[in-house]
Image (tube, rainbow, N blue to C red):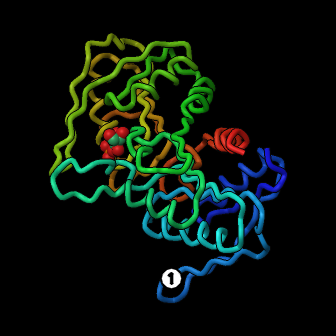
């Protein structure tokens, strides 16, 4: 690992970046940061990062446009100051879901973000559990989609669930379910989800899984409206699940998601410190995963 590494506290990830720095045995760099009365952001490095390797930890959860522009300002300023290498560490990669033109004429938003991050000066892009690896093809710099599912599995072990069974709510979540079930030493199954390309509404068809008397664990990358998890939870309950726990990397809980999950019979839901504001519980830290990846990268 480089001795010149600086971990920058992105304004959206002050807690997480502190934990990453701790895990690497260094102090994080606090930027000067203020918001002008009209909403524009001011960012200043209080010390030189010339010749250093700089990791900017900034998860781009809602308000994603603001968090993204702040990320770009920080990366660009670090490059201007002569940073040797810059890692944009973006656990929640906003717009990653729009990784293709699924209808003619659609903006491929993930590609735009990749281009902007590179244009600002990032030499590495690290993200965590995005819906698929497809968006990685937009980067010409080193990019990685890390997973925190092993850490989530370790946390699930502490919950004393009874004869747990892991469920993936769609095929995209199969690798996540595989990792969590391997960590727990239990089985997993996956359901099929279809999403209407125009309205975005989701429908789920289950598989014949005997969940009688068992505690179901549904894992996903993101929980936003909660509808994906709610559909899966309802099927799990019908198939006899005693309780339903939902776990994800990025717990957004937009709108009335909490109510949607409760009504579907979800007993508990949690995420990670990828998200630092808003509703819900974020007991798992992804800091060890990020610190490990940074050590390997540099
Ligand atoms: C996309 O399919 C993702 O993997 C998630 O399943 C999805 O983003 C969850 O969104 P929501 O909570 O709104 O159903």
Front position in the image: 83 or 292: 83
Q: Secondary structure at mark 1?
A: loop
Q: Position of residue 45 (x, y in %)?
A: 72, 74
Left or right relative to 40: residue 5: right
Are there few (<14), some (14-19), or many (20+) residues within 10 Å of tag 1?
Answer: few
Q: Residue 218 falls in which quadrant of the image?
A: top left
* Residue 5 against residue 46 in the figure, above or below: above
Quadrant assignment for the C terminus: top right
- Which residue is pictured at 57% across the width and 27% down the height? 153
- Which residue is pictured at 43% across the width and 55% down the height? 94
Q: Quadrant of ligand 1?
A: top left
Front position in the image: 225 or 68: 68
Q: Position of residue 46 (x, y in %)?
A: 76, 76
Q: Residue 246 falls in which quadrant of the image?
A: top left
Q: Position of residue 96 (x, y in %)?
A: 39, 50
- Which residue is pictured at 49% across the width and 70% down the height? 69
Residue indicated by mark 1: 40
Quadrant assignment for the N terminus: top right
* Residue 139 against residue 151 in the figure, above or below: below
Left or right relative to 70: residue 166: left
Outermost residue toward the front in this view: 140
Left or right relative to 52: residue 125: left
Left or right relative to 193: residue 248: right
Front position in the image: 269 or 111: 111
- Which residue is pictured at 51% across the width and 40% down the height? 145
């Amino acid at each position: 690992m480089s001795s010149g590494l600086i971990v920058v506290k992105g304004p959206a990830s002050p807690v997480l970046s502190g934990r990453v720095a701790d895990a690497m045995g260094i102090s994080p760099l606090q930027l000067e940061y203020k918001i002008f009365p009209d909403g524009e952001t001011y960012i200043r490095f209080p010390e030189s990062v010339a010749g250093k390797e700089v990791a900017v930890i900034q998860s781009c959860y809602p308000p994603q446009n603001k968090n993204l522009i702040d990320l770009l300002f920080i990366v660009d300023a670090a490059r201007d100051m002569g940073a040797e290498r810059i890692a944009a560490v973006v656990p929640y990669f906003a717009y990653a879901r729009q990784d293709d033109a699924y209808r003619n004429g659609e903006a491929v938003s993930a590609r735009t973000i990749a281009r902007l991050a590179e244009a600002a000066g990032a030499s590495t892009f690290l993200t965590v559990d995005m819906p698929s690896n497809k968006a990685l093809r937009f980067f010409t710099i080193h990019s990685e989609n890390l997973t925190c599912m092993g850490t989530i599995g370790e946390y699930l072990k502490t919950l004393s669930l009874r004869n747990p069974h892991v469920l993936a709510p769609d095929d995209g979540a199969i690798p996540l379910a595989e990792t969590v079930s391997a960590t727990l030493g239990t089985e997993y199954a996956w359901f099929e989800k279809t999403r209407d390309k125009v309205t975005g509404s989701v429908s789920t068809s289950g598989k014949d899984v005997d969940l009688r008397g068992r505690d179901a664990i549904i894992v996903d990358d993101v929980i936003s409206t909660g509808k994906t998890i709610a559909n899966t939870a309802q099927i799990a309950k019908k198939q006899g699940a005693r309780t339903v726990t939902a776990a994800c990397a990025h717990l957004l809980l937009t709108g009335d998601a909490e109510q949607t999950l409760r009504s579907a019979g979800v007993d508990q839901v949690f995420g990670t410190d990828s998200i630092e504001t808003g509703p819900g519980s974020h007991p798992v830290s992804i800091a060890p995963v990020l610190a490990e990846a940074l050590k390997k990268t540099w």
